[in-house]
Amino acid sequence: MELSSLLNRFSEPETLKMAKLGRELRAKGVDVIDLSLGEPDFDTPQHIKDAAIKAINDNWSHYTPVAGFLDLREAVCTKLKRDNNLDYTPDQIITSTGAKQSLANALLALVDEGDEVIIPTPYWVTYSELVKIARGKVVEIRTTVEAGFKATTAQIEAAITPKTKVFMFSSPCNPSGAVYSKAELEALANLFKKYPHITILSDEIYEYINFIGKHESIAQFSEIKDQVIVINGLSKGFAMTGWRLGYTASNITLAKAMEKLQGQFTSGTCSITQKAAVAALVGDLKPSIAMTEEFTRRRTTTLALVNAMPGFKCFAPEGAFYVFPDVSSYYGKSDGQQTITNASDLSMFLLNTAHVSSVMGDAFGEPHCVRFSFANSMENIEKAWARIREALATLK
């Protein structure tokens, strides 16, 4: 059997790979603490579950419009106006089976073979692989811990060529936790209005998990609004990872293009999820706020523990629920059996020695870093970092 060459153009997500390795160890009876997956350890709020149950009882069990039920797209518009002061109409909204599909829709609608997509590092693992699937070329902009893991306008403009089709970023950022301020986004907007052929993919899935103030969207700047595709969803802010609901807000031309693509891949997303999503988007935000408050407490504890690790250099995340320390001071060290030569080695060392799962930074475009989640209980976080400290002490 000869498989498609498409499969050779991209890699399995390291986040999923590390989670799988952790499960395999756990199945052998090993007590593995998972700091790898980006999933809130909270249950979906009750009022959202109640809406889903009602939808089942009301027999919302048939095919849905490709773009999503009208009431859901209206709810997205209501949310965007309420939280972001963004004006969109339902025909500019496409709902999908998770924000990952929304990203895929956007890139496949925009990128032809050889088109360039600028992505600041570090970036979520799937960004680069989706570009490769679309036969585009990834152009990385390296950011640093010292710069708060943010790209400057000078860096971006230097990377723009006649082949540049898309600029892609997230704020809050997975994995770094960087959050772009309104002033920083305005500077980006002033840059991109000089390049109207470039579309901006703004991934805002971690919007509600923000530790420094109000979330700001680059779509708020009217001169470039039609160049922007806002990507968002329910997984992170509403603890609805398994429900699979993402959405885009864009100009109508792009919306129709993404709807056309989705019509051949999945059609409309789950009918019950859509009805639950309406309750999430326009309902009580207190559970989401409470969740962020708990993440704030865990962030404080995690930062204290990470900063106590000898040799770790860590940026204090401004959003999302990860720390992304530079661990390169351990390169070349050994416990007598294994020598650490890169972030992947260190991540695997911690899994097999400390029994703590993480994700190597290479997957995010930053080879000197490792991502650790704090979407776990305070007890597990404290236990995990005690194990990590003990394991690191064996490296000489």
Image: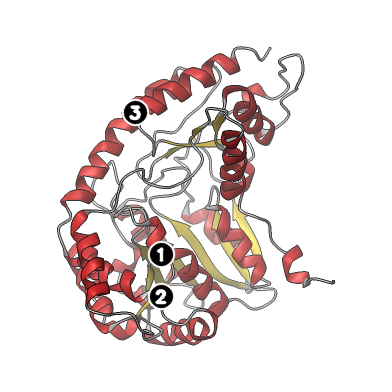
Query: Alpha-carbon distance for marks 2 and 3?
Result: 35 Å
On-image quarter of the N terminus: bottom right
Which residue in the structure is indicated by mark 2?
A: 269
- Residues 362 and 358: in front is 358
- Given residues 248 and 36, the one toward you in this image is 36
Q: Is residue 133 above or below residue 294?
A: below
At which x and y percent is residue 310? 53, 16
The residue identified by callout 3 is 378
Going by the image, does 173 lie left or right of 23? Answer: left
> Local crowd at mark 2 within 10 Å, few (<14), some, or many (≥20)?
many
Residue 375 makes an appearance in the image: yes
Residue contact between numbered discs 3 and 1, judged by CB atoms under 8 Å: no
Q: Secondary structure at mark 2?
A: loop
CA neighbours of label 1 inside 10 A, class few (<14), some (14 to 19), many (20+): many
- Depicted 52 relative to depicted 207: above or below: below
- Mark 3 crowd level (few <14, some 14–19, many ≥20, 10 Å Cα): some
SS class of the residue under badge 1?
Answer: loop
The answer to which of 120 and 302 lies nearer the viewer is 302
The disc label shown at residue 244, or none? 1
In three-dimensional space, the C-alpha distance between marks 2 and 1, rounded to whole angstroms, equals: 8 Å
**Tag 2 near tag 1, CB within 8 Å:** yes
Q: Is residue 183 left or right of residue 390?
A: left
* The quarter of the displayed image where residue 85 is located: bottom left
Residue 215: x %, y % from top left: 27, 54
In this figure, what is the number of numbered marks? 3
